[in-house]
Structures are given as C-alpha cells and as structure tokens.
Amino acid sequence: MSRTLLKINGQSHTIDVEPDCPLLYVLRDSLALNNPRFGCGLGQCGACTVLIDNRAVRSCTLPVSAASGKEIVTLEGLATEGNPHPVQKAFIQEQAFQCGYCLNGWVLTAKALLDKNPHPSDEEMRSAFQNLICRCGSHVRIFAAVRHAADEAKRSA
Amino acid sequence: MAIKNVLSRREFVKDTGGLLIGFSLADSAVLPRILAAAVEANPAPSPNRLEAWLRIDRDGNVHVFTGKAEIGMGVETGFTQIVAEELDVPFSRVFIAMGDTSSTADQGGVGGSTSIALGSKPLRNASATARTLLVRLAAKNLGASADELQVREGVVSVKADPSRKISYAELAASGDLDDTLKVSGEGFALNVEGLGKPKDPSSYTVVGQPIPRVDLEPKILGKWRYVTDVRVPGMLHGRVVRPAGVGATLMGVDDSAAKKVPGYVQTVTKGNFVGVVAENEWAAIRAAKTLRVNWSAPEQAFPEQKDLYQHMRSVTPKATKETMKKGEAAGVLASAAKKFQASYEVPFQSHATMGPGCAVADIHTDGVSTIWSGGQKPHALQKGFAELLHVPLEKVRVIWVEDAGSYGRPGFEDTAADAVLLSQAVGKPVRVQWSRADMTAWGTKGPAVVYDLAAAIDEHGEITALDFTSRAFSGGEIMFVPATADNYLGSQLTGIPNRSGVDEFAQWGVQAPAYVFANIHAVSHVLSGFYDSASPLRSTHLRDPEGPQTSFAVESFMDELAAATGADPIEFRLRYLDNARAKAVLTAAAEKAGWERRSSPKPNKGSGDIVIGRGVGLSTRGGTYVGTIAEVEVNRRSGAVRVTRFVCAHDCGLIINPEALRGTIAANLIQSMSRGMKEEVTFDRSNVTSVDWASYPIARAQDIPAQVDIVLINHSELPSSGAGEPSSRATAAAIANAIFDATGVRVRQTPLTPARVKAALSVAKA
C-alpha cells in the first residue's frame, strides 16, 4: 500500500492503495464515484472512461500510480451544480441512449473530441468513437447529439 | 384500505411493513430500491388491493408499484404517462417503483415485449379506479354529484364553478379510500379491474406525447445508480473462477498465494463452483488470478465449430412438433412444375451485455436474505433463491436495480446466484462482479438454428406449396423464467443438474410472418444441448427468441422466391399476406424509401468494386408489424458490406411515447444489424472461445448507417402491442436481400461477414 494523491473533479484526495490497482476501482470503491463503469477490464469498451488532462483515458487498465497528480475529471465533475455541460445538454436533448450503462465513455469522449476539434466531420467523429462499445445500438442518436453539441457551440460562438 | 398517505413532502418514503425510510426526491427514482435495509422481507403485496398498485401522498404525488422493470427502452416513462393520463395528474407527480418483491406484485417481470402491452393494464385500471374513488370523495366534500365535477392536474373542481375545488392531496389526507380489485390472469397477464373505467384513447393528452424519458437526464448527468453501485454495510467483493472447460471437475485448489493478497478473506468451493471473497474489488481480482485451481480434463462435448451445422442436421432431434399442416404440401411439391429450395444457418450468439453482470447478496439462512439484481424477472429469482437456500419464499427478498440492457436471460441471474452462494459461505453481504469472459464465454447463449425450406412454383409463377423445417437448440434449454434452484450456472456447478429446461421451437408463422399459401407443411425440431449442466453453450432467451433466426430464413426465402419468379420483393410479399397492417408497413416503408418497383438483382450493376442494392424484410410479432428496408454498399473485391440506410415502418397499435419508441426502434435496428453482420459465438471442443469484445465483435461507430428513417403508424383505436423486440426480426434478412440485390449472390448464413460474402461471391464467379 502507498499513499497516492489524486486530483479528481477539482478536489484533492490522498488514498492508501496498491500502486498497481487500476484507477477504476479506486474511483468506484474508495471514492464512490460511480460513473466510471466496469465494462470489460481490458480497455476495449470505454465504459470506464475518465478525462485525464482533458484526454479520454480508460481507467480500468490505468494503474492509479500513473494518474497521481494529474487532473482527473469523471462524469460527475462535468457539470457545475445546476448547469449541465453543453455536451450533456445535447445528449439529453437527443435522448441519446437506451440503458445508458456505456454513456460515461461516449459523453466524455465526445467532450474531449469537441474540445480538440469543435466541428468534426462525420468521419472524424466515427473514428473518435470507433473504440467505444454501445451494446444497445444507440449510435444513431449519439451521433445526432454530438452534431447537436457542435452546432450549438457554433451558434453561440 | 386503498390509498394511504404514508409519504411525506418531496420525499419518497418506502413503506415496508411499518419500516419507513426517507429519501430525497433527487434520487427518488433509484435510491429506495438500493438503500432499503436488508432486514425485512414481505410477501409480494396481494394484487387485489388498490394500494398494492398505487398510493397518493399528502402532497398529491402518486407512487406506483409494479413488478415490471426498466431494461433501457423507456418503459418507466411509458408507465408514468399512462398513470398521469388516467388520474389527471401532472406527469412530474408520478413516481414508479419497480421490481422489489416485497412491495410489488408479481407481474412475471420483463419479457416477450409485453411490459406496455400487458404490464400496463393493471396500472391503467388501478389508476382509473383511484380517480373514480377520489372524485366520489370530492363529491361528498364539495356537495356536488360526481357528474358535475372535473379533474385538472390533480385538483377536483365543480365544472360550473371551478372555484369550488379540492386537491387529490387534501382528499388523500382526509380519508380512507377502500377498494378491492378483481384479479385475473397471472405473470405477464396479471390484470386487475375496479370501479373506474379507463379513458377513451381519443381524449388522451399525456399518452401519445413525446415526453423525454425520466431516466435519461439523470443518467447523462451522472446521477443514476445501477446495480453495480449498490453498497451495503459490511459488503465484501467476490469473483468466480470457472472450470477449465465443459465437464471439468474440481481436483483441488491451492490458495496459498491468494491468502497473501492484502484484503483476502476466503476461498469458497462447492462441487465445481469456485469463488473467492475479499475486502475490496482489486483484492478479489488479484486473489482470483492467483488461485491455483486444478481441474480434470474437460469433456470434448462440442463438435468442431466448422461441423456445427452438419451436426445439427444429422443428430436425432430431442423433440419434434408439426406446427402446421394445411392442404397437401408434399404432394404438390412432388409434382410441381418448378421446385425451389434453400437452407439457412444462424449461429449461437451471446447477450454480451455492456455490463458483464453484477449482484449483491446478503444471505441469512436463519433470517431474511436480500439479493440486489438487474435480472429481468425478480419474482422468479425470489422463488429460485428460496429453493436454492431451502428457505420459505417470504424469507427471500429480491430487489431489482437496473443493470446494463439485459435483452433476455443473459446471465445476470447466474451472477446473482454466485453472490448468493458466496454470501452464504462467508456469512456476509457479497457483491459479485463478473469479468467480461464470465459474461461472454460463460453467460447463456441465444440458440443456433438451421432451416430447410422448399416451395412449389406453378407455371404462372404462383407459389402453390411451402415446406418448412427448423432444427434448433432449445430457446429454453436454460428455462427463461429463472424460478428454480437448478436454473443457475453456479448451482449447476455445485452439482444440481439442470432439470427445469423446456423445449422451445423455432416455428413457422410464429417467429416469422405467416404468409398464406394453399398448401403448407411446417415441422420444428429441438436438438439436445451438448452437455446437460453448466455448459458455456447452454441456450435460452436472447432478444426476440428465435425471431431473428427464423425471420432471416423465411424473409430470405421469400426474397429468393420473388427473384425466382421475377417479382418485385414487396409486391410478391403483398400477394401472400392477408393482414392489412402487415401490408401497410411494407407499403409505408417502400414509400418512405422511394422503393423502385422491380425484381432483384439490380440491373446495370456497373463494373466497379462497389455495388449498391436494397432489400426488404417483414416482421410480425404479437400484433406488431414492422417493414424494414436496408440499403447497402457491397465491395465485390473484399466482401465488405456497409449498410448506408435503414427505413423502418412500425405499427404497434396505440403509441404511448413516439420519441421513446423511435429511440428503441433505432437502437434495435443497429443491434439486430450487429447480430446479422458480426455476431457469432466461437468455440472449440470444450470451451467457448468468444471471451471479450475482440473475440466477439459487435457493430461499432464506423458500421452505423448514415441515415435511419422511422415511420410510425399509430392506431389509437387498437391496444398497444410490443415494441422491444419486433424490429429485431427482419433486419438480417433485409441486409442479405440487399446484398443479393447488389450482387446477384445469396448469402444464407449469418453473420454476413466480409469473409462469408466474399466466399459466396467467388463461388458465384467460379
């Protein structure tokens, strides 16, 4: 066990944890941050996604020691109180999911994509999402939500 | 006593036999089921009491109790609309509690696309009765007759003088509202009727509206709780270790290394069931990995995968059913001017749920046990776990909490049984999280099926006879109602043999449209599973059991017959349909798609690598009708197929929420496209070798069509029928038919992978 400093959603936490423990279990079990979800434990599906320094990262395969000191944002930290992130608003507007178990990965990956590339082409969007799984098949509405968010940003720019 | 005011302002209070627990409204949709203490179990409330279904609190909030569950298609929102409509209360005042065996009636759980079609009936009738009782009470209170009153937003007033009014909240606080309901049916068909008659659908103002789903906003904002998020005091974490292959028996476990993992608690073995329990998840994962388990050599129970369909055609069936005999199909076929026959093959598929299965169990064999599970049928699980634990039913409480989309009986039931076994062994609450391989390899499967069809064509190109034969592994090899101890993988591994399975057939006219021919003979066979118990290739319900399989065969065959007779595929189908609604969805889809009337294949394909085509499929299921058109691009060099557009016309009677329905259909089209184009469980002689998303690929972002057009046909004069499964059915056939249209080549085996399409193309070329 070693003491690890984690900066999550703007707050600092010092946690006693095995350094090789994947970040996912620390977030879920030590900090009760539920939105990074276990989907495969293999980095294949994206349900466990978090933003680290605003890049979408799979927390199920990332040792907690590698995340120490970096800015970690989970879905819980995306909205400010009473004010959903524009990407969340777009996903709500488009009613983009079925069960929603995977949505953590899609919403955070969309946020990271649009921060980097505010007006992605269809191909750029598909490519950014190619390594995410949605078992229900909600893709059509997910894409609509990302376009919606991009258009909204253009309008308000 | 019917409507009680047990609930306080802006708080959801759970009344569990005198035990009141309060929650803030922000979490009301989920927290009651999660936090309710595991100290008390009540038998399911008797459905003949109105309060079993519905209660109104002092603030006029309506709390509804149903044995149904949300599996991601928006049924909670639909129920909310139905209740708000009948009671004339604002949508935002209605709260649905689902699937807790202590507080909801046994409605058979979720299945068969029946939650709205059947499951909403008692809610509608109970609401109508509650409205009638409230109006009567108001009449007494306001000194007017019931006819003189109106209800708006939960307030009863005198029509002629609306200033004379009283709210539901005041009425609920003022007195008892007694009613006994007449109960009929059970399971999915459980219904109640009381004094109140439901409204005429023509007067609906809430039902039929595109109201946003109640769950999606909190989910997207990160405020939802799934079963994975259940934490109870003193909870430990468990992982299971499955056998080295089918039939392998446990020879011994060396847990000396596991014991050194910090947080390790206990290794549990019972028969061939092996699990490990630790204080936290990471310790459980590490301990499970370090367990050295010695298994006997597994059985070579499965054929080589390449021989699967040959095996299925050559074995003696376990059961056979002649499902239709009309006229003299055999004789007509024997003397036909032209006979056409074709065979189709569909593989085992995995539910491969997004979350691999998670459950928490707190077992007290001398007291009350509580199990939190996302399985679709909580009341069945309650029965099964009572049997497994040898305790009376009332000593087991199953609390349904939403898990990832389950799409049948995926293994969430088995995960819960694992948690029961581990908690029982360690005497503490245990949370079990399955690994990806636990789900994909060892979860239940949708059955493989092979079909042989033949048709007689007369000199005018009319179909005069049809012969249909299916050979399927049973859709009930593992009973889809998980209500017995032998049902679960964990209990089978402990040595309880699977005895509750049933024969479920892939049938003409049931899982595919019932086209009308003068002579039809249809026979369905069920084949024995490869291994009696604890097999990773055990089959059960996967979304629309045998529907996508049978519809792939029948809808492909109809397309082949249309091509063989030079007919347009839609016109050809219309000729052999006698159902106006089935015809209407085909016509509506054709119109939306701009369908060109002609036979397949498409003329003038050109000489490039990429060719395009269109195909159609019809689905009929339990009163729902779906016409699906797929447009595809096929790369003739690589065999790669890309669906560029779906058009889907959908008629499920009265539509409760068109936007939620569109979302479900759109997702259903993509999931069924994935199953038709990508999904096939792989196996060797002893094991399933599909273990993760790399070895069980499904559709991803780059596979998604650019355009999906959905045409909803609303029949408000008809009852609602199901929408969860019907649009799964015709997709694979529509795509295969489009491939034929584009290339002139027929692919009769799913999934329609590039390798299969390429092989069919090269056979045709040779």
Image (spheres, coloured by chain):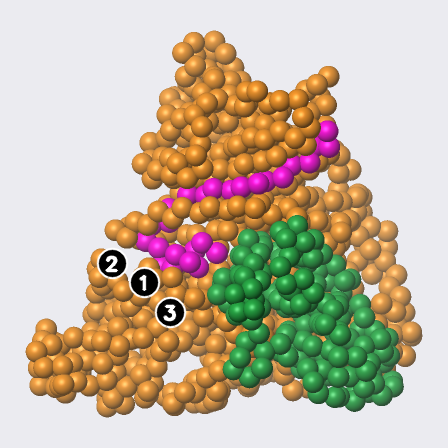
Chain colours: A green, B orange
Say above or below: B488 vs B42: above
Disc 2 to disc 1, C-alpha distance: 8 Å
**In which chain is the residue bearing label 3?**
B
Report if the CB atoms under discs 2 and 1 are less than 8 Å apart.
Answer: yes
**Mark 2 residue element:** helix
Q: Position of residue B181 (x, y in %)?
A: 27, 70
Mark 1 neighbour class, 10 Å CA radius: few under 14, some 14 to 19, many 20 or more: many
Residue nearest the observer in this picture, B604 or B186: B604
**Where the N terminus of chain B falls, by quadrant?**
bottom left
Disc 3 to disc 2, C-alpha distance: 16 Å
Q: Please give left or right for residue A56 compared with residue A145 in the image.
A: right
**In which chain is the residue bearing label 2?**
B
Q: Which residue is mark 1?
A: B207
Q: Position of residue A49 (x, y in %)?
A: 70, 68
Examine the structure image and report whether residue B619 is included in the region drawn in magenta.
no
Quarter of the image where one finds residue A153: bottom right
Say which residue appears at 39% left-offset and 36% top-offset.
B591
What's drawn in magenta, residue-wise?
B637-663
Q: Please give left or right for residue B300 compared with residue B617 in the image.
A: right
Amino acid at the residue labelled 1: Val
Say which residue appears at 75% left-offset and 79% top-offset.
A71
Can marks 2 and 1 be said to lie on one chain?
yes
Amino acid at the residue labelled 2: Pro
Amino acid at the residue labelled 3: Thr
